[in-house]
DNA sequence: TTACGCCCTGTACCATAGTACGAAGTCAAG
DNA sequence: CTTGACTTCGTACTATGGTACAGGGCGTAA
């Protein structure tokens, strides 16, 4: 069984060494055994754990949520429904963000359409719309 | 001409007093004149300036971007096109965020669909998909 | 005049997700 | 055995957008 140093783990998982230490402080990865010298000895599959975190992050989970997700695993009797439920909640969360961004985009498009791009900024309809039409 | 104290301005603009001081530190609102006592004296239209900031924030601009937007006003000869350009960039920015969120949502939906919600978490297809199918 | 509420300053703190750095110890190659 | 790369720890710093608080000064009404 090979074992990895922090640096090797970092390289394989494609993250910064400090990120690994940070995850350990956060309790997202367990403290690995140490050599006499104090060097950490990570098992091979620590790479998979880091990648779990990274994939979940890409899917919009925060580190806190990921930690909760990982904690569920500790008790294999936890019903799978709990995990599905978090996923569904996250989907709703993302739908809310999508709605909000679409609203924003619509408003910005209206501003952009109102502005020819010609003339001095003093007459800019975009700034006027944002600020009322006063000059401070 | 009425003039406002920090607290009055905060109340009218519907923000925290500390937020106003924070904006002043950031250079987002100019330092107002003071009374003998040191009390700030805001002109009435400071309310509009705060609201400009708040509206722009709602539209997805960061304080830094808002500051740049406000700085454009200082020289009324700045062409309006500059403002339009920033707006267009921000629209593209938001479109990018929308694409990203849609990708995430799709991936999460696939995960959620793969999971019946029944059975123990040890067999959960969601966690398996995130982590590879290993048990740490 | 005293009491209460506001205002002033500077600084520290919150969450989020890391990154950077110094000082010291360790490991491996030459 | 030395050198250079790597590891350890603790702490401080980054960016973002504020919030909180202590210790003092000010303002006004009763």
Image (cartoon, coloured by chain):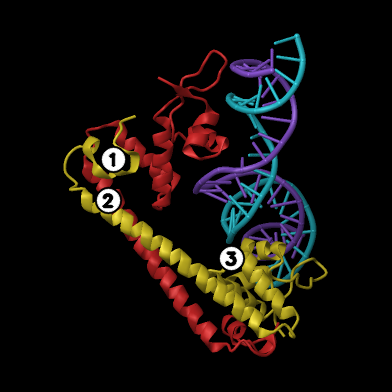
Chain colours: A red, B yellow, C purple, D cyan
**Viewer-closest of A104 and C6:** A104
Q: Nearer the viewer, residue B128 or D4?
A: D4
Residue A68 lies in quadrant: top left
- Indicate the position of residue B7 as horizontal and vertical percent values: 64, 68
Which of the two discs, 3 and 2, labels the residue nearer the N terminus? 3
**Where in the figure is residue A64, as x and y percent of width and height?**
43, 44
Residues marked 3 and 2 touching at CB (< 8 Å): no
Q: Residues within 10 Å of mark 2 (few under 14, many from 20)?
A: some
The residues bearing labels 3 and 2 have C-alpha atoms spaced at a distance of: 33 Å
Which label's residue is closer to the chain start, 1 or 3?
3
Q: Which residue is pictured at 24% across the width and 41% down the height?
A: B124
The residue beneath circle 3 is B62
Work out how far the residue at label 1 is from the one at label 3, CA to CA, in angstroms: 38 Å
> From mark 2 to mark 1, how far is it between C-alphas?
10 Å
**Residue D22 in picture, x, y percent from top left:** 68, 46
For disc 2, the chain is B
Tell which circle, 2 or 1, labels the residue nearer the N-terminal end.
Answer: 2
Q: Quadrant of the C terminus of chain A?
A: bottom right
Which mark is on residue B111? 2
Disc 2 is placed on an element classified as helix
Q: Are marks 3 and 2 on the same chain?
A: yes
Q: Left or right of B129: which side holds A106? A: right
């Amino acid at each position: 069984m090979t074992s990895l140093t922090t640096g090797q783990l970092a390289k394989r998982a494609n993250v910064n060494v400090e990120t690994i230490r940070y995850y350990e402080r956060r309790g997202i990865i367990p403290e690995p055994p140490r050599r006499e010298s104090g060097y950490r000895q990570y098992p091979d599959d620590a790479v998979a754990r880091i990648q779990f975190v990274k994939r979940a992050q890409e899917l919009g989970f925060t580190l806190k949520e990921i930690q909760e997700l990982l904690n569920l695993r500790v008790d294999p009797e936890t019903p799978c429904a709990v995990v599905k439920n978090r996923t569904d909640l996250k989907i709703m969360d993302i739908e809310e963000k999508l709605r909000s961004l679409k609203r924003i985009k619509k408003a910005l498009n209206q501003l952009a359409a109102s502005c020819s791009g010609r003339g001095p900024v003093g007459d800019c309809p975009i700034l006027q719309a944002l600020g009322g039409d006063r000059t401070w």
